[in-house]
Image (cartoon, rainbow, N blue to C red):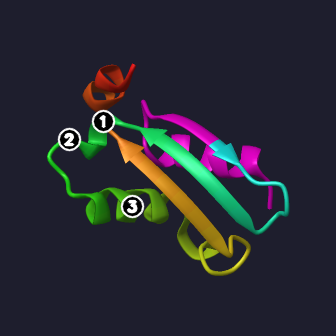
Amino acid sequence: MDAETIRKLIETGLPGAEVQVQGDDGVHFEASVVSPAFRGKLPLARHRLVYATLGELMGGAIHALALKTITPEEAAQAR
């Protein structure tokens, strides 16, 4: 598994999302996801949305995925 494949899967599953993924060992990754789909959702629900885009890869080909999930408004405030 590689970071680029994970990025594409998340972007496909969450249209309009801005996604950055890092990970050099092929099983442990970090992702930053900015999506309007996160509006009004608690962190756990946001993470579940991302995990759903990866399906059975989670816990298999992807051993660990650290997530930062924010809305576009939250991203704008952080700048």
How many angstroms separate mark 1 from mark 2 (CA)? 6 Å
Tag 2's secondary structure? Answer: loop
Question: Which tag, 3 or 1, sits closer to the chain's start?
Answer: 3
Q: Which residues are magenta?
A: 1-20
The residue at which mark 2 appears reads as 39
Circle 1: residue type: Thr
Indicate the quadrant where residue 15 lies. top left
In the picture as drawn, the residue positioned furthest to the left comes out as 40
- Which numbered disc, 1 or 2, marks the residue that appears first in the sequence? 2
Residue 35 place in picture, x, y as percent: 37, 37
Residue located 80% across and 61% down the image: 1
Q: Which residue is mark 3?
A: 47
Judging by the rendered image, the residue that carries numbered circle 1 is 71
Check residue 9 for magenta coloring.
Answer: yes
Local crowd size for mark 2, using a 10 Å CA cut-off: few (<14), some (14–19), many (≥20) = few
Callout 1 environment at 10 Å: few (<14), some (14 to 19), or many (20+)? some
Question: In terms of depth relative to the viewer, which is nearer, 33 or 12?
Answer: 33
SS under mark 3: helix
